[in-house]
Image (cartoon, grey):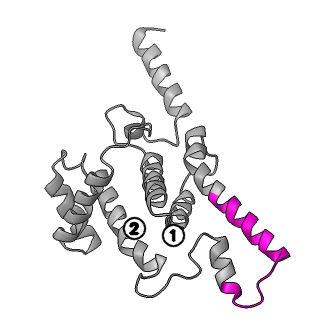
C-alpha cells in the first residue's frame, strides 16, 4: 500500500467513525457545535437564575435541555445538574406539603414549592413579566454571538442579520447584545 492509499484509508476510517458529525464541526477552524450553543444558553439561564432567583429561568433552561443529545456526555450532565437539583428540591417541597396541606389557597402553596413568591404584592409585576423581555433579549444576544463568525466578527453585521431574521428592530437587538456583553462577556468554562 502506497502513501496515498494509506491516507485514503485513514480518511475513510475517520469518516466512518464520525459519520453523524459534519466535518466543519470536527475541524478546529469550523464553527462551534450545536451542543456548545445549547450549553451556552443553559449557562446564561443559570447565571440569570442565580442573580434573580426567578424560577422561570430554570424552566427556560429545562426547555433547552430537550434539544441536547439523548445520550449526554459528562459536560452536558454537569451543565444540567443545577436544573435537576432545582426540580428535585421542588418535588421534595411539593411532596412534603402533601403531609400538611393548606386549608385555603393551595395555589400559593404550589407556587412556593416551585420557588415563586406566593405573595408577590402589587406593582412589582409577576415573575413571568419580569423574565419575558429578559429571556427574549438573551436569546437575541446568543443569536448575535452565533452569527459573529459568519460575519467575520463584525458586530453590526451580525446584529443587522439577527434583527432581520427575528423581525425586530436593529436598536432592540443592539441593546440586547450590549447588555449581554456587559453582563457576561466570555464564558471561560465551556469547551469549544
Q: Nearer the viewer, residue 154 or 43?
A: 43
Pointer 2: residues within 10 angstroms few (<14), some, or many (20+)? some
Query: What residue appears at the point 70 percent right and 59 percent down from the top-left corner?
Result: 88
Residue 52, percent across and down? 45, 63
Can you tell which mark lies on residue 101? none
Query: What residue appears at the point 54 percent right and 47 percent down from the top-left corner?
Result: 79
Magenta residues: mostly which secondary structure?
A: helix
Query: What residue appears at the point 46 percent right and 58 percent down from the top-left corner?
Result: 45
Q: Which residue carries the number 1 mark?
A: 56
Magenta-drawn stretch contains 93: yes
Q: Nearer the viewer, residue 192 or 172?
A: 172
Answer yes or no: do the residues labelled 1 and 2 have beta carbons within 8 Å?
yes
Q: Is residue 47 left or right of residue 90?
A: left
Residue 171, percent across and down? 17, 69
Q: Nearer the viewer, residue 21 or 87?
A: 87
Q: In the picture shown, does residue 6 fall above or below 143?
A: above
- Disc 2 is placed on an element classified as helix
Residue 63, percent across and down? 54, 64
- Disc 1 is placed on an element classified as helix
Q: Is residue 32 left or right of residue 185?
A: right
Q: Which residue carries the number 2 mark?
A: 135
Q: Between marks 1 and 2, how big is the CA–CA gap?
A: 9 Å
Query: What residue appears at the point 49 percent right and 9 percent down from the top-left corner?
Result: 1
Q: Is residue 112 left or right of residue 172?
A: right
Write down the region rendered in magenta: 86-107
Mark 1 or mark 2: whose residue is earlier in sequence: 1
Quarter of the figure with the C terminus: top left
Amino acid at each position: 500500500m502506497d502513501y496515498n492509499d494509506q491516507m485514503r484509508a485513514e480518511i475513510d476510517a475517520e469518516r466512518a467513525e464520525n459519520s453523524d458529525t459534519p466535518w466543519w464541526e470536527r475541524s478546529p477552524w469550523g464553527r462551534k457545535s450545536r451542543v456548545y450553543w445549547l450549553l451556552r444558553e443553559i449557562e446564561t439561564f443559570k447565571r440569570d437564575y442565580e442573580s434573580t432567583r426567578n424560577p422561570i429561568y430554570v424552566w427556560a433552561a429545562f426547555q433547552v435541555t430537550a434539544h441536547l443529545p439523548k445520550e449526554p456526555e459528562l459536560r452536558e450532565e454537569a451543565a444540567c445538574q443545577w436544573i435537576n437539583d432545582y426540580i428535585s428540591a421542588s418535588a421534595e417541597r411539593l411532596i412534603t406539603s402533601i403531609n400538611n396541606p393548606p386549608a385555603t389557597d393551595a395555589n400559593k402553596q404550589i407556587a412556593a414549592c416551585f420557588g415563586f413568591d406566593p405573595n408577590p404584592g402589587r406593582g412589582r409585576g409577576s415573575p413571568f413579566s419580569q423574565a419575558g423581555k429578559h429571556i427574549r433579549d438573551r436569546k437575541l444576544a446568543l443569536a448575535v454571538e452565533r452569527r459573529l463568525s459568519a460575519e467575520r466578527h463584525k458586530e453590526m453585521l451580525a446584529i443587522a442579520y439577527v434583527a432581520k431574521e427575528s423581525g425586530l428592530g436593529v436598536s432592540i437587538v443592539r441593546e440586547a447584545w450590549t447588555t449581554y456583553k456587559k453582563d457576561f462577556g466570555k464564558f471561560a468554562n465551556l469547551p469549544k
